[in-house]
Amino acid sequence: MILGIDTAAQTLGVALAETGSIVARKSIDIPNAHDAMLAPVIQELLKENGLQAADLSTVAVASGPGSFTGLRIGMAMAKGFAFSLAIPLIAVPTMDAIAFAVRRQRNVEHDSQLLVALDARRERVYHAAYRSEGDAWTRISGPALSAIDDLKAPHAAPLLLAGDAAQTLAERFSRGTVLSVACATAEDIVLLGTEMLAAGQSADPETCEPLYLQDFIVKQAKNPLFTATEKE
């Protein structure tokens, strides 16, 4: 049984998967609640499905970019499971998970290009570009952080845009199809994590850290077990 944890955005999500299929999921959409709610939500999900932590074989976690505080809390929890249960840790890049969500939801033409863009505040975006090859995406650039005004539209056609900054870029580029995929979910994290596990792409719990892409400052945490951070 694989546990997926997504704390990269405002919505806290956890999911369980086995043999490539979703077994159960749970999400909470409460601002700034990740530190207080993540452990109880995981406990509830396991209990509701007659499971214990010892039944987990792998843990997959959104590794960023995204909310600094959320990423740190999710990674700390995932590392705790990996260390205490001696199970693999899969660090799933947020942008790859959004591209995976697009693949789950629609058929994509061969050689089409996908640009995933997330709001990074202060007129900046996190972004990564992908090209469709068969039934999968290949990342061709990013993830990176850029000012919106510095981004140029890819030349490939058709161009698909996903992420919560997709509409902004479509207006700037005057082209591209905006998809409804604004973010990834815990289901995307756990299912893509399953594929990464099969490909031998596990992370070292001792050295694995979230991908922030920009500086942050430390603030007082609500939960003393975690260090809270906020975007500058």
Image: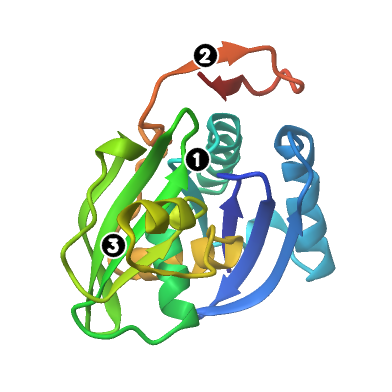
Q: Residues within 10 Å of mark 2 (few under 14, many from 20)?
A: few
Residue at the spot x=52%, y=66% of the render? 181
Residue at the spot x=78%, y=34% of the render? 36
**Front position among marks 3 and 2:** 2
| Amino acid tagged 2 | Ile
Left or right, 98 with reference to 108: right
**Front position among marks 1 and 3:** 1
Q: How many marks?
A: 3
Q: Residues within 10 Å of mark 1 (few under 14, many from 20)?
A: many
| Amino acid tagged 1 | Gly
Residue 80: numbered disc = none
Is residue 52 in sight in this rendering? yes
- Residue at the disc numbered 3: 200
Q: Position of residue 19 (x, y in %)?
A: 50, 80
Q: Is residue 86 above or below residue 4?
A: above
Residue at the spot x=41%, y=55% of the render? 171
- Residue at the disc numbered 1: 66
Q: Residues within 10 Å of mark 3 (few under 14, many from 20)?
A: few
Question: Which element is circle 3 on?
Answer: loop
Q: Is residue 80 above or below residue 141?
A: above
